[in-house]
Image: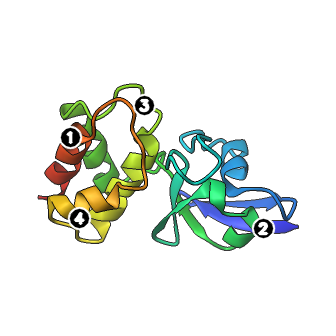
Amino acid sequence: MKITLKVNGNIHEVEVEPRRLLVHVLRELGYTSVKVGCDTATCGACTVLMNGRPVKSCNVLAVQADGAEIITAEYSDELMEKIREAFKRNHAAQCGYCTSGMLISAYHLAKSGAKSEEEVVEGISGNLCRCTGYQNIINAIKEVLV
């Protein structure tokens, strides 16, 4: 089946099997920030924005994303750059495996107008980090939301 994806502003027409997961298609297109973590929609390493909403791409069939606008952590605009810089300043990444999903969640939080620490904690609750203890990530996101 042929599908069309708009990823980070780039149009891709891709031939996929109906059972193919979006995470694998994105990685094959070169968007390697989208990590294959748990394959059970638990860890959030594969989180992308699909039509403005965070989704775990290991839980989405590529055919379900036909015609969708996808944003990955490779996306670059002023807001994403501010988020990346805040992550650096706050030492919000250690091993880096969760970072892409956290960046996408932070981007969504900023775009949706989140302000409180409670909103940040809720907004990243689908992303697991085994290294930082979360506080540095929360601090980085809150810095951008101010």
The answer to whether 66 is drawn above or below residue 110 in the figure is below
Marks 3 and 1, the one that precedes in the sequence? 3
Amino acid type of disc 2?
Ile
* Callouts 4 and 2 close, C-beta under 8 Å: no
Residue found 83% across the figure and 61% down from its top: 19
Q: Residues within 10 Å of mark 2 (few under 14, many from 20)?
A: some
Residue matched to label 4: 119
| Pair 4/3: label in front | 4
Looking at the image, residue 20 sits to the left or right of residue 114; the answer is right
The C terminus is located in which quarter? bottom left
Q: Which mark is residue 79?
A: none
Going by the numbered disc 1, the residue's amino acid type is: Gln
First in sequence: mark 2 vs mark 1: 2
Residue 96, disc: 3
In the image, what residue occupies the spot 41% across and 39% down? 99
Mark 4 or mark 3, earlier in chain: 3
Q: Nearer the viewer, mark 3 or mark 2?
A: 3
Q: Which residue is mark 2?
A: 3
**Looking at numbered disc 3 in the image, what kind of residue is underneath it?**
Gly
Distance from the alpha carbon under mark 3 to that under mark 1: 15 Å
Q: Is mark 2 in CB contact (under 8 Å) with mark 1?
A: no
Crowd band around label 1 with a 10 angstrom C-alpha radius: few (<14), some (14–19), many (20+): few
Q: Which residue is mark 1?
A: 135
Determine the secondary structure under disc 4. helix
Whether residues under marks 4 and 1 lie with C-beta atoms below 8 angstroms apart, the answer is: no
| Residue 121, image x, y percentages | 26, 56
User: Which residue does the image show at 34% across and 51% down from the upper left?
Assistant: 80
